[in-house]
Image (spheres, helix red, strand yellow):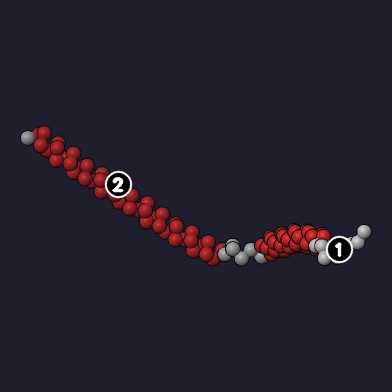
Amino acid sequence: MTIDNTKPISNTVFSSTKIKEKTSSADEFQANLNEVKNKENKEKISSNQLNNKDLDLGAIREDFRSYAWQKMREDQYKKNEETLLNKLFATIDAGNAANKKI
């Protein structure tokens, strides 16, 4: 029996091995990518715990001042409106009472 070396039998074995290597390489790449992401997330969490740059008390104070000023103005407008309405109704009532006497 003679062996024919021109047959691509060994090539199919190597090609399937290469596919497996590519698959494992893609899996390894994904695992490495996930590891890097997890490491970055942990670093972000630890850095946020040590110094929180998002918490700016000056900005919060200014926001509160602005809110308080706006709220005070709205409350004053409501008081003024209520006072004017009360005066208007008092004037109307006085006019109606005067018309009834006549």
Q: Amino acid at mark 2?
A: Glu
Task: Determine the residue located farthest toward the right in the rendered image.
Answer: 1
Task: Determine the residue located farthest toward the front in the rendered image.
Answer: 1
Asked whether 76 or 64 is in front, the reply is 64
Which mark is drawn over residue 30? none
- Badge 1 crowding class, 10 Å Cα cut-off, few under 14, some 14 to 19, many 20 or more, is few
Identify the mark nearer the N-term, 1 or 2: 1
Task: Kindly indicate the quadrant of the structure image that contains residue 90.
Answer: top left
Q: Is residue 68 left or right of residue 36?
A: left
Circles 1 and 2: CB atoms closer than 8 Å: no
Identity of the residue drawn at 73% across and 61% down: 26
Q: Is residue 99 left or right of residue 30?
A: left
| Residue receiving disc 2 | 82
Residue 55 in percent (x, y) is at: 59, 62
Identity of the residue drawn at 49% across and 59% down: 64
Instruction: State how far apart marks 1 and 2 are (Cα).
Output: 106 Å
Task: Determine the residue located farthest toward the left in the rendered image.
Answer: 102
Identity of the residue drawn at 86% across and 65% down: 5
Residue 47 in percent (x, y) is at: 69, 64
Helix, strand or loop at mark 1: loop
| Residue receiving disc 1 | 4
Task: Kindly indicate the quadrant of the structure image that contains residue 88.
Answer: top left
**The N terminus lies in which quarter of the figure?**
bottom right
Asked whether 52 or 61 is in front, the reply is 52
Q: Amino acid at mark 1?
A: Asp
Does residue 39 show up? no
Residue 79 in percent (x, y) is at: 33, 49
Residue 91 in percent (x, y) is at: 18, 43
Residue 88, relative to residue 43: is it above or below?
above
